Image (cartoon, rainbow, N blue to C red):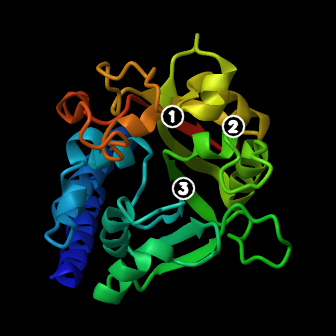
Amino acid sequence: MQHRLAIALATSTVLALTACQSAGIGPAVNQAAASAQRMATLQQAVAQAGRTPANVARDPYRHPAETLDFFEVDPNDTVVEIWPGGGWYTEILAPYLASGGGRLILGTLDGQLGGVTKLRDANPALYANVTSATFPAFDATAVRVPDGTADVVLTFRNVHNWKMGYRRDDKQDYSADAFRQIYAMLKPGGVLGIVDHRLPENASAERERTSGYIKASTVRQAAEAAGFRLAAESEINANPRDTADWADGVWTLPPALRLKDQDRARYLGIGESDRMTMKFVKPL
């Protein structure tokens, strides 16, 4: 069923763009039509029957179609998804990119598919264009994304981990290296899309090291230091109910719910964290 979905999505995309060209529609209108078609194709990928029910339940907090449209992810793009975890976004990106002949590269700590292996094994045809590379690649022998090959790099709720030194014995901040590697893998004009747990700007530096939240200004500074230009920001994933001051950090809220049954109803009522959504561009 998912393979047929990919064919249908590809066909609808081609027909829509061909109709615009045949009608002699000007560039601005043509661009608007292409954007509308991108959103329609994304919505179909989000709605596909093959998604994991537990992942679908997170859609109201993560707004996947709107988020990927904001990042201008097209079906024929080469996309790098950094640290996909169990494949929440991969489950959407794989059929979406398959519909237009695009390619998905998963940047993982060990260069393997990890939690996405189960998804691939269940539907090999749909994940045929999904490969993996090491990120961040600090070892010269690691298989990394080749420089200048990606149209879009996406990272969801990960920059705070780099700041916190996640998976490093010394817990040192390696965000500068991470951004430099992302910059290198993108083509000129390529897009870096970031979603992360947003810390209020008046919070302490210590909160960035311990809470799982990070300031938007910190993210912007790190990205711009690597050479990126901030193109746009969105409130798609904002949640004003999240005060970002929990004693147990962002993991207090769903889906982690670190406190388990303690005040569970309260935290479920708040929902997932307040998140920044930032689009950066590698200059031409």
Q: CA distance from mark 3 to mark 2?
A: 15 Å
Residue kind at label 2, given as amino acid type: Ala
Mark 3 and mark 1 in contact? Answer it, CB < 8 Å: no
Residue with the mark numbered 2: 223
Q: Nearer the viewer, mark 3 or mark 1?
A: 1
Please say whether residue 237 is visible from this viewpoint. yes
- Per the image, label 1 sits on a secondary structure element best described as strand
Image quarter of residue 82: bottom right
Q: Quadrant of the C terminus?
A: top right
Measure the alpha-carbon separation of dots 2 and 1: 10 Å
**Given the image, on which type of amino acid does mark 1 rest?**
Met
> Where residue 242 appears, x then y in whole percent?
35, 23
Examine the rendering and report whether any part of residue 277 can be seen.
no
Of helix, strand and loop, which one carries label 2? Answer: helix
Q: Is residue 191 left or right of residue 233?
A: right
Residue at 56% x, 55% y is 153
SS at circle 3: strand
Quadrant of the rendered image containing residue 56 = bottom left
Q: Position of residue 116 (x, y in %)?
A: 42, 74
Query: Sequence-wise, which precedes: disc 3 or disc 2?
Result: 3
Crowding around mark 3 (Cα neighbors within 10 Å: few <14, some 14 to 19, many 20+) is: many
Reading the image, the residue beneath label 1 is: 278
Instruction: In this rendered view, identify the residue nearer to me: 249 or 199.
Output: 249
Which residue is situated farthest in the top direction here?
202
Q: Label 3 is placed on what type of residue?
A: Val
Residue 5, percent from left and from top: 19, 76
Q: In the picture provided, is 206 more to the left or to the right than 74?
A: right
Q: In the rendering, at what x and y percent does residue 180 appear?
A: 77, 49
Residue corresponding to mark 3: 152
